[in-house]
Every structure is written in C-alpha cells, then in structure tokens.
Image (tube, helix red, strand yellow):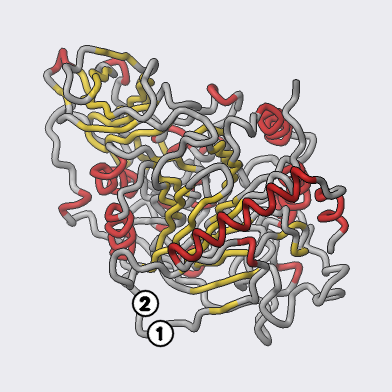
C-alpha cells in the first residue's frame, strides 16, 4: 500500500465501508450484466496487443478535388458551420465562414463588417423566432520571406446563443438574412443540467485527426455511435504538413529541412471545416490545441488559425486564453489544458487552473475530466516523456483535486493506463487514456520505449515547443526502473496498448461509474477494441474541498 493511498484512505469508518460495499456490488452487477471489467478489479497486468501488419489504413490526405472538401455554397452563403459549448447547458456557440479565402502574393482581406452574423433559432417543432447577433473576423497567415504565399481567410462568424433549456432539441439557421444568405436548417441538443444523475449519453473522444482516408473511416465510425459531444484533443487539420504552394509530406522536417520558417497551407483548414460540417454543425465539438496548430508566422504570431476558427468558452470560464479553458457537460466538469503555453506554477495558466479546480462542486459535477495534447503516461518511443516538465508542474494539483480521467493525443496509437500517480500505481490516481490514433497522415506509433534498443537518449526527449525544450526527464528514483530512463518491460502503469487507428466513446452512467469503449477503425461497427468501467471511489479518495 502506497503512502498516498494511506493518506487518502484515512481510518476506516462505517460510512466508508458501506460505500465501498455498494461500489463493489454495483461493479459486479455491471460486469455480470455486460461482461465488462471495472477499474476496481485493477491494477491489471500490462497487455500489448500484437501489431496487425495487414492493416495500415490509408494515410493519404484527401485531395482538394475530392467533393467532400470542395466549396458548394454561393456568394456569402455560410459554410464550415460548427457548434461548440459555452461553460454550461444554457449557452452554445455557432460558428461559420462566408466568402472565399485568398492565397498568393497580392491578397486583400475581406471586410468582416460587410456580412452580418445572425442566428435564427427556436425549439424543435416551433418557429425559429429567436435571433442572436455575434461578431466576425478575418485572419491572415503571413510570411516575411520571398516566394512564400500568404493567406487570408473568409469571414469567420461566432454567435453565442443564451437562455437555452437543458437537454432540449433546437433548430437553427445562420447567416445574413439581409443578403438572402442563410444556411439550411440544422439541429442540436443542449447538454443536460449539471447534477450527479445527469449526463450526456455518449461523448466521442479523438485525437490527431487530420484529413486522410483514415480520418473518414474514424469519423464514419464516430457518427455511427451517435455522440452528443465530440472532444478533439489536439492536432486538427495538419495544414502545417504542407508548403504554402500546396506540396505536402508525411514528415515535414525530413522533406523540407531547409525552409526559413515552418510553412503551412492554410486551405487545408477550409477543407477540414467543409468535411466535418455534417457532423459538427449538429454535434458540439470542443477542441484543445496540439503542436500542429502552432503555425508560426510573421511577427512571431502563433495559433492564429486555431484561435480564429473555433469559439471557446474562455471568457465564460475565467480564462484569458483560447489555449486553456473549462466547461460543464451535465455532471462532468472538463478542464482543457494547454501544453504549448506556460504551465509553470508562477504562470497564468496554473493560477487559472488552481482557481477553476477550487470552484468545482463535486456534489453537482462529480466527474472531473482533464485533457491536453501530449501524454504524460505513454510507453511508446514516439514522444516518450516529452511533456515531463508539464507533469512535474501540474500533476500534484490534479491529484489533490481528484481528477478522474485524463485524455491525451500526440502519440499515434492507443493506450490506457491503470490508475497512476507519479509513475506509481495508486487507486486514487487518474486513468490516463491516449487516443492519438484519429487517422492523420504521419506514421503510426509502433515501437515501445521498454523494448530492447528503443529507449531514447534522454537529452533527445524534450520538445522545444514545450517549455522551451527544458529537460525534466531524469532517471526513475524508485520502483522496477530505478536508476533507468526507461523500463525494460511494459510498465506496470500501462494496462493496455495497441497500434491501430480509432476513437473512443465515454458513457457516464452515474456519479461513480463511467463506461469507456475504444473502437478500432478496422473492426465492424459496434465492436470494442477495449472496454472498461472506470469507477470513482469518493469515500476512499476524498478530494480537496471547494473553496468557500
């Protein structure tokens, strides 16, 4: 028994014992009913699913000639329509683009004020008598180097709807009615009201999506699961895998090592928005940035496309940045953290995180879920211990407040951990799940750092995009890997890992049980590649109380 477990468990009491018995009985009933294991039966012996060499998928990007990515609207009619949540059920954001992008040497940005930002909406089956007005913007991707093509976007619109009822189906159309440029009617359902017995039915979780034929398989599988919400844990369009002339590659640094700046081909963002519209115009999508969204340009500007194209509940959640924010979805509080901005204890994000965690009422939102892009607990060689500095700064805080589940991407494979804290098995630590297997054009992660000859040189592991490339990944000081940088077998904290494309579905059943299912793209619809009930134990693992 670890010291942290002893500390959190405290002395036994009648309420504690009763609570544990109830949890165990509920877990047994669920297992008998569905044959699904629960985390109460863990920690599980590590499993590596053998690589299926017959299935590599199709990691080729959709070309600009594909009908799924071509512009089909006329004039200033809306396209690339998407939906995102505000901080609570009573509000959502509707976003879209009007007008055409421009790319080349002589570009003239469109006037954002030339087209209105209007959403007409109402409850399903009634008239769309409500109207909200938002704001619009245009962004540019500019390069101070001769021969590189500049880009300016169409007009991007963001409108916030307020005063909505929980768990209610609405219909809407967006655009500018004065120009007879309105969209078709779309539909969305609001999140349930926050409470211990109130949850969205299914939440799809995916990372490193891109826009390949693998992506289309992932999205088709995801749509078949009828999600109420989509979490995209970084790396969206992969526009930065291209030069500004539209030449793409599977490895930018391999193919274009001599470019004066890391170029991007911004139209790939427009292609992605068009392809995704049928899903995300009706199902809200919540995005956090990955390394592929950085997209440096003139004047050292970064994350401009990401911050412009999506609407974020930053202001509503007390954040001053699009790179980190939070929101509620029923009885779940989601924390979206930024790995590519300052996360030091003295920085703005850490201070915001402390305040946000201290404000969470676990009686209202029992589940606490965190996401960011690069994983802390991945055993693949790719990006091994790359975000160690972030873990050193933030892990204690997340543990103290009892984060239940962490979702990450970045590593192009699937992995689920046992409950873990500071590299040690801990029944009160989060379950870490890496889902960087959405289907992008970069290669799948296959090798593991614990296999002979695969442990990376420690000094090679920091990413200069994370905390300036500061090295924090020292050798382990205890446990089976003491004195080493890597384990020599699959680590105990790794429950299961597999190199396949796919996505996951989270179904929170009540205040203590959530069903997690990971689906492989190569499987038939409805088949689970990994399935487990994640069980909270609030009696055993009390959390730091909410600030008064």
Asked whether 309 or 196 is in front, the reply is: 196
Horizontal side of 404 relative to 315 (left or right) equals right
The label number, if any, that marks residue 96 in the structure image: none
Instruction: Out of 12 and 452, give the one closest to the viewer.
Output: 12
Residue 496 image offset from top left, x and y in percent: 57, 72
Mark 1 and mark 2 residues within 8 Å of each other at the beta carbon: yes
> Is 389 situated above or below 256?
above
Q: CA distance from mark 1 to mark 2?
A: 7 Å
Residue found at x 82% / y 65%: 474
Residue 116 appears left or right of 125? right
Q: Is residue 407 visible?
A: yes
Q: Is residue 68 above or below residue 170?
A: below
> Of 234 and 470, which appears nearest the observer?
234
Image quadrant occupied by the C terminus: top right
Which residue is located at x 45 percent, y 48 percent?
232
* Disc assigned to residue 56: 2
Disc 1 crowd rating (10 Å Cα; few below 14, some 14-19, many 20+) is: few
Residue 317 on image: x %, y %: 57, 26
Residue 529 figure quarter: bottom left
Which circle marks residue 53 in the picture? 1
């Amino acid at each position: 028994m670890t010291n942290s477990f002893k500390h959190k468990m405290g002395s036994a009491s009648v309420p504690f014992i009763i609570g544990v018995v109830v949890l165990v009985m509920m877990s047994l009933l669920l297992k008998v009913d569905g044959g699904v294991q629960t985390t109460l039966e863990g920690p599980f012996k590590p499993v590596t699913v053998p690589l299926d060499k017959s299935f590599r998928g199709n990691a080729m990007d959709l070309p600009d000639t594909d009908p799924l990515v071509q512009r089909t609207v006329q004039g200033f009619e809306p396209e690339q329509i998407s939906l995102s949540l505000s901080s609570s059920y009573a509000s959502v954001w509707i976003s879209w683009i009007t007008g055409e992008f421009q790319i080349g040497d002589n570009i003239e940005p469109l006037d954002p004020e030339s087209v209105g930002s209007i959403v007409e909406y109402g409850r399903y089956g009634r008239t769309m008598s409500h109207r909200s007005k938002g704001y619009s913007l245009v962004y540019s991707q500019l390069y101070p180097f001769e021969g590189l093509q500049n880009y300016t976007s169409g007009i991007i619109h963001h409108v916030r709807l307020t005063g909505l009822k929980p768990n209610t189906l609405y219909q809407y159309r967006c655009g500018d009615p004065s120009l007879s440029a309105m969209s078709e009617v779309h539909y969305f359902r609001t999140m349930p009201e926050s409470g211990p017995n109130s949850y969205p039915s299914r939440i799809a979780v995916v990372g490193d999506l891109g826009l390949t034929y693998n992506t289309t398989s992932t999205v088709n599988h995801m749509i078949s699961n009828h999600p109420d919400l989509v979490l995209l844990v970084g790396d969206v369009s992969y526009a930065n895998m291209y030069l500004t002339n539209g030449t793409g590659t599977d490895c930018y640094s391999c193919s274009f090592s001599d470019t004066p700046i890391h170029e991007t081909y911004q139209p790939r963002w427009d292609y992605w928005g068009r392809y995704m519209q049928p899903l995300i115009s009706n199902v809200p999508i919540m995005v956090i940035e990955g390394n592929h969204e950085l997209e440096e340009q003139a004047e050292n500007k970064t994350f401009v496309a990401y911050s412009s194209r999506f609407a974020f509940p930053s202001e509503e959640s007390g954040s001053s940045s699009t790179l980190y924010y939070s929101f509620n979805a029923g009885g779940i509080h989601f924390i979206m953290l930024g790995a590519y901005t300052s996360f030091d204890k003295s920085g703005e994000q850490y201070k915001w995180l402390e305040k946000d965690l201290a404000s969470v009422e676990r009686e209202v939102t029992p589940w606490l879920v965190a996401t960011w892009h690069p994983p802390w607990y991945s055993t693949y060689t790719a990006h091994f211990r790359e975000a160690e500095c972030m873990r050193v700064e933030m892990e204690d805080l997340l543990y103290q407040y009892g984060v239940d589940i962490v979702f990450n991407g970045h590593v192009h494979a699937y992995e689920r951990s046992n409950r873990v804290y500071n590299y040690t098995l801990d029944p009160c630590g989060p379950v870490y799940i890496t889902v960087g297997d959405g289907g992008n054009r970069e290669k799948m992660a296959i090798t593991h750092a614990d296999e002979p000859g695969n442990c990376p040189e420690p000094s090679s592991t920091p990413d200069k995009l994370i905390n300036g490339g500061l090295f924090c990944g020292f050798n382990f000081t205890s446990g089976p890997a003491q004195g080493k940088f890597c384990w020599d077998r699959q680590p105990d904290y790794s429950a299961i890992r597999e190199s396949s494309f796919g996505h996951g579905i989270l179904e929170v059943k009540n205040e203590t049980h959530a069903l997690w299912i990971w689906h492989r793209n190569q499987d038939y619809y409805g088949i689970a590649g990994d399935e487990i009930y994640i069980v909270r134990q609030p009696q055993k693992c009390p959390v730091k109380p909410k600030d008064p």
